[in-house]
């Protein structure tokens, strides 16, 4: 896809981000809830709890986004980012938007002085795994991740 730009999202981008975030959540079997999506993003942006990068076409139409959450690594005693969300609208897929969002996320992390970005994806999300590996991401073969549902 030609003619698109990636910028860091601000509160004024909420109306464009919320429908994509809602669609992203639906991809992961969550019920549609545009108000919840908008409120969640508003809280993250207004409290500066995440950085959201938004891709827009030449006509300013939103194409996709990625969301980064700041974390810290005790071992390296450095800043890291969790790339928690990556979504490209269906009509914009296959045009390089996801690759560009990943590249811009890496540039954002480097500029912030982070030592690494980290992410996880479903074992069955093979398309995402191919994308990440093409972009230079490597699957962790050393550590096993666990979760505790609260």
Image (cartoon, rainbow, N blue to C red):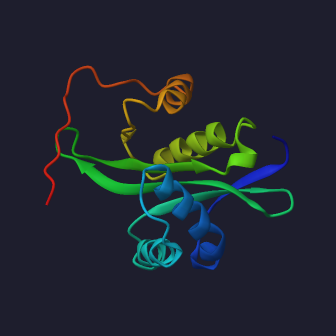
In percent of width and height, residue 56 lies at: 74, 58
Write the residue at 46% across / 57% down: 25
State the quadrant of the C terminus: bottom left
- Residue 31 position by quadrant: bottom left
Depth order, front residue of 6/25: 25
Q: Is residue 9 visible?
A: no
Depth order, front residue of 11/22: 22
- Residue 14 position by quadrant: bottom right
Query: Relative to residue 108, is residue 16 depicted above or below?
Result: below
Depth order, front residue of 45/145: 145
Left or right: 79 as drawn, with respect to 137: left
In percent of width and height, residue 58 lies at: 85, 57
Q: Is residue 141 visible?
A: yes
Write the residue at 64% across / 76% down: 15
Write the residue at 51% across / 30% down: 132
Write the residue at 49% across / 27% down: 126
Q: How many marks?
A: 0
Left or right: 77 as drawn, with respect to 106: left
State the quadrant of the N terminus: top right
In percent of width and height, residue 28 lies at: 43, 50
In percent of width and height, residue 71 lies at: 29, 54
Give the farthest residue toward the top.
Answer: 141
């Amino acid at each position: 896809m030609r003619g698109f730009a990636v910028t860091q999202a601000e509160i004024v981008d909420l109306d464009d981000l919320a429908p994509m975030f809602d669609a992203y959540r639906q991809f992961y079997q969550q019920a549609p809830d545009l108000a919840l999506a908008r409120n969640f993003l508003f809280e993250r942006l207004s409290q500066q709890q995440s950085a959201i990068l938004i891709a827009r076409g030449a006509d300013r139409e939103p194409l996709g986004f990625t969301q980064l959450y700041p974390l810290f690594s005790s071992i390296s005693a450095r800043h890291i980012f969790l790339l928690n969300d990556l979504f490209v609208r269906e009509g914009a897929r296959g045009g390089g938007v996801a690759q560009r969002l990943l590249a811009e996320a890496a540039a954002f992390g480097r500029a912030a002085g982070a030592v690494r970005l980290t992410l996880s994806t479903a074992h069955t999300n093979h398309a995402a795994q191919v994308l990440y590996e093409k972009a230079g991401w490597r699957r962790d073969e050393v550590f096993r991740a666990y979760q505790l549902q609260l």
